[in-house]
Image: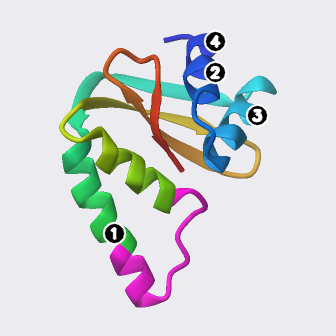
């Protein structure tokens, strides 16, 4: 997957984190797409919704966009997703892409 394809997938997601990751990509941020394996969005939702709950219970402030990303993973159901990262000037973004790599399912 090249930079243009990742930008296209992120541009279809209107959430704040996806827009911020897209802006970082446009100014040359490093990115990596992990194409060697996929995971079920449902399994990832199980993991991240639990982590989010623990963060809130222990007073840890979740990174911006995590709540919306968890909802995106839940909405994707059992679909397989790929993970990508964008390392920007201020933070690193975690991105989950649809199995055909054309849509951003979740970003935080």
Q: Upstream in the sequence, badge 3 or badge 1?
A: 3
Circle 4: element type: helix
Q: In this view, does 40 lie above or below 46?
A: above
Q: Upstream in the sequence, badge 1 or badge 4?
A: 4
Q: Identify the residue at image location x=76%, y=44%.
A: 89
Q: Identify the residue at image location x=61%, y=61%.
A: 64
Mark seen at residue 51 = 1
Residue 100 belongs to magenta span: no
Q: Is residue 90 above or below residue 58?
A: above
Circle 3: element type: helix
Circle 2: element type: helix
Q: Give the range drawn in magenta.
A: 53-66
Q: Position of residue 68 (x, y in %)?
A: 49, 55
Q: Mark 4 points at which residue?
A: 4
Q: Do the residues labelled 2 and 4 touch (CB within 8 Å)?
A: yes
User: Left or right of 106: which side holds 64?
Assistant: right
Mark seen at residue 7 = 2
Mark 2, residues whose alpha carbon is within 10 Å: few (<14), some, or many (≥20)?
many
Tell me the CA gap for discs 3 and 4: 12 Å
Q: Mark 3 points at which residue?
A: 23
Q: How is the image coloured?
A: rainbow
Tell me the CA gap for discs 3 and 1: 27 Å
């Amino acid at each position: 997957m090249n930079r243009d394809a990742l930008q296209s997938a992120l541009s279809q997601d209107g959430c704040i984190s996806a827009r911020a990751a897209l802006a970082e990509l446009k100014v040359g941020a490093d990115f990596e797409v992990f194409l060697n394996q996929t995971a079920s969005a449902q399994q990832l939702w199980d993991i991240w919704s639990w982590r989010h709950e623990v963060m809130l219970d222990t007073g840890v402030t979740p990174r911006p966009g995590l709540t919306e990303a968890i909802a995106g993973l839940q909405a994707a159901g059992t679909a397989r997703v790929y993970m990508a990262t964008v390392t920007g000037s201020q933070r690193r973004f975690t991105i989950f892409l649809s199995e055909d790599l054309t849509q951003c399912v979740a970003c935080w």
